[in-house]
Amino acid sequence: MPKWLTKKVLILALLALLAILFITFVLPISIPIILALITAFLLEPIVKWSKFKFSWKRKTSVITVFILFLLVISGVLYFTITQIIGQIIQLSKIAPDYFNTLSLSWMNVQSKLVSFTQGMPTEVIESINQELKTFFSSAQKAVLGIIDSDSISGLLTEIPNFLVSFIVYIITLFLFMLDLTDLKKMVFRHLTPSSAEKVRFMTSRLNSVIFGFMKAQFLASLFILVASFIGLLIIAPEYALVMSIVIWIIDIIPILGSIAIVGPWSLYQFITGDIALGTKLAILALVLLIIRRAVEPKLMGSQIGLSPLATLIAMFIGLQIFGFLGLIIGPFVVIIFTTAKEAGIVKTNFKL
């Protein structure tokens, strides 16, 4: 047997194989359970605080925190789902009127295009008209395809599946909250004292990172709220308060951001012929994007313990590999590696 083929190497290879199998086959169908476990860890400090503050038993603290969490999450989901479905139905009713307006605007654009292209070869003018017409037609079909009756029916048919997953999530969360201490004891029972200390260090570090990430996102969104409110006071004061709040709420979601609101708004103004307002909104979208990209690495670095340079590099690489979701995955991968290094699990003390 080769010298490098030790018991430790075999165990690591087996663990790596099990991890690959888990990620490939088990993870996609167990997302509600994994989210329930993560939520139980996040709610554990509140359970401990209520247990200490009111001298309750753990079961009483768990039930109280669980009920409060259930009320909050149910209220948010009810409001969000009803608002989304209502807005989609409303949009499906008024979409034809919007497209009629856009068609009239398109006719105006064509008439202006004719005056601008006077003196050009006929082939060039026809080519430009055809390309713009194709683009407008494709955009119209794409939007109508999203809000047609089949899409709405498909969305409604997904609600039962979502409710089943949500029920599984809630039940599993309650059971995890009740048995979390026993689960920790069961895991640590199979670890050596040094390994147990390393796992405790990593768990504590990752908990602080998660809360730090949430805090950084909230603080960055406050910069966007102030900037969007000031910008809209100048651009469109009648919509400043409402739209800045909408932009702030959307911007808290890491993958979407403020550009998801201001970008389409600016494009709509361009299409309908209000070039001035569309340009101002485009500038505002660019300013908000710059603020987010300038402030986020600094806040993320200060809250999760990474330097702004490392955070920016991790976010960029994550974006290139995983898309927008990589803006979250990248820094977390670096944090996990750094934490494992600090705990002594990963050793990098080598020289070339």
Image (cartoon, rainbow, N blue to C red):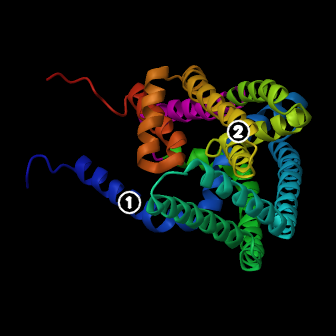
Q: Looking at the picture, how far across and down is residue 306, in whole percent?
A: 49, 23
Residue at 80% across, 43% down: 58
**Vertical order, 228 against 35 (above or below):** above
State which quarter of the image contains the C terminus: top left
Neighbour tally class for label 2: few under 14, some 14-19, many 20 plus, Cα within 10 Å: many
Does residue 139 appear left or right of residue 335 in this picture?
A: right
**Which residue does the image show at 50% across and 33% down from the upper left?**
202
Q: First in sequence: mark 1 or mark 2?
A: 1
Q: Is residue 342 above or below residue 95?
A: above
Q: Give the extent of the magenta segment.
A: 190-219
Q: Nearer the viewer, mark 1 or mark 2?
A: 2
**Res. 192 visible in picture:** no
Where residue 120 appears, x then y in whole percent?
Answer: 48, 53
Q: Is residue 284 magenta?
A: no
Check disc 2 and give the amino acid type: Asp
Disc 1 marks which residue?
Answer: 20
Kindly indicate whether the residue at mark 2 contacts the one at mark 1 (C-beta within 8 angstroms): no
**Hey, which quadrant is residue 225 in on the image?**
top right
The answer to whether any part of residue 275 appears in the image is: yes
Q: Which quarter of the figure is the N terminus placed in?
A: bottom left
Amino acid type, residue under disc 1 in the picture: Ile
Q: Which mark is residue 263?
A: none
Checking the image for residue 251, the label placed there is 2
For this view, does 64 lie left or right of residue 47? Answer: right
